[in-house]
Amino acid sequence: MIYQLYFSISDEDGKMDYWVPLMNYFLSQSDTLEIHCWNEEEVVIEETKSMLEDSFEIIMENNLTIFKGNKALDIVNHLLSNNVNVEGKIKWFSIFLSKNSTTIFHSEHWGTEFFAPNVNEKDIAFIKSVMPIETNFNQYI
């Protein structure tokens, strides 16, 4: 059976150790990604631009800078190894992962809210195994 899963945590304790295994799991299934940053996050935007080396489309929309493009190994490595800012929080406001133009995963609000629209029981078991115990899960059919 396929489910939709929304889950969230409070970022009060500041521990983000769940984020890398979670993102790695869904990055391995994706072929494209979209990264959203608030325009005032200038340092993150500049770093992201240099990481992507003009391989992504950059869209300025409302108060957001949006990067869209195909997944590549160097981008995946950067997302998984250089993902926190000086405060220890996830750098990017939102990351959307897709495969064949179908969204498979969202990491939002700097890695504290997530949505997986097409997951099976195995996916859900993995997600629950890496998320903190206090994670709020809402599962829908």
Image (cartoon, grey):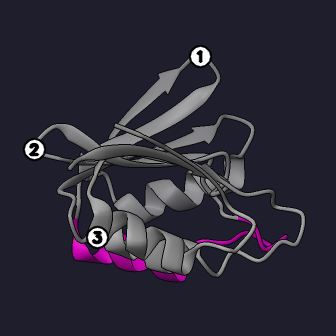
How far apart marks 2 and 3 lie (CA) works out to 21 Å
Determine the secondary structure under disc 2. loop
1 in relation to 125, above or below = above
Q: Is residue 16 magenta-colored? A: no
The one nearer the camera, 72 or 29, is 29
How far apart marks 1 and 3 lie (CA) works out to 38 Å
Q: Nearer the viewer, mark 1 or mark 3?
A: 3
x, y percentage for residue 33? 31, 50
Residue identified by numbered label 1:
62
Residue identified by numbered label 2:
100
x, y percentage for residue 23? 43, 68
**The magenta stretch spans which residues?**
72-89
The one nearer the camera, 67 or 140, is 140
Residue identified by numbered label 3:
122
Three-letter residue code for mark 1: Asn
Q: Mark 1 or mark 2: which comes first in sequence?
A: 1
| Residue at screen point 63% across, 57% down | 111
Determine the secondary structure under disc 1. loop
| Residue at screen point 32% across, 45% down | 3
How far apart marks 1 and 2 lie (CA) works out to 27 Å
**Position of 101 compared to 112: left or right?**
left
Three-letter residue code for mark 2: Asn
